[in-house]
Image (cartoon, rainbow, N blue to C red):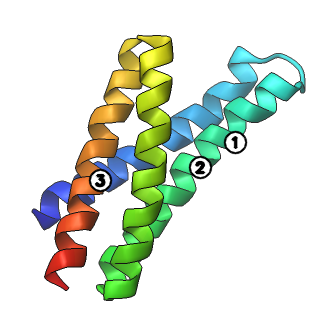
Amino acid sequence: MRKTWVISTYALLLLGVVHVGYTPILYRSLSVKAMWFLSCGLMLVFQALLNILAEKTRLKSGYLLALLANLASLVFILVLAWMLREIQALVGVLIGLMVTAGSLYFWKKA
C-alpha cells in the first residue's frame, strides 16, 4: 500500500507541476482566469508536498492533515470532473482517490 500511495503522490505532484507549467500556454496574459488555473496547480503541488511530508515523518498527525487536505481536494476534483466531463479531470479523480485512500489507510494504521 505504501508504494501505491507514494507513486500516486508523485503523480499528483507531476500533475500539479504540469498544470502550473501549462498556465502561460493556455493564458497568454495575466487574468483572473489565469490566476485561478495557476492556483489549482499550486494546490495540487502543495497537497502532494503535504503527503510526502506525512510519508517521511510517519506521524499520525501528519497523516491526519494529509487526509483532510486530500478529502477537501477530492471533493473539489469530483465536482470539477462532473462539470468538465473531460479525461484529464477523470485522471485527477483517480489520482485523488488513490492519494486519499493511502492517507486514510496510514492514518488508521498509525
Label 1 sits on a secondary structure element that is helix
Disc 2 residue type (three-letter): Met
> Which residue is at the far left?
1
Label 2 sits on a secondary structure element that is helix
Residue situated in front as seen by the camera: 108 or 52 = 108
Residue situated in front as seen by the camera: 44 or 103 = 103
Q: Label 2, label 3: how many angstroms apart (C-alpha)?
A: 14 Å
Circles 1 and 2: CB distance less than 8 Å?
yes
Mark 1, residue position: 39
Give how far across and how far down residue 62 sits, in percent. Answer: 40, 80
Q: Earlier in the sequence, mark 2 or mark 3?
A: 2
**Residue drawn 69% across and 27% down?**
23
The quarter of the displayed image where residue 21 is located: top right
Numbered tag placed on residue 99 in the rendering: 3
Mark 2, residue position: 43
Give how far across and how far down residue 45 sits, in percent. Answer: 54, 52
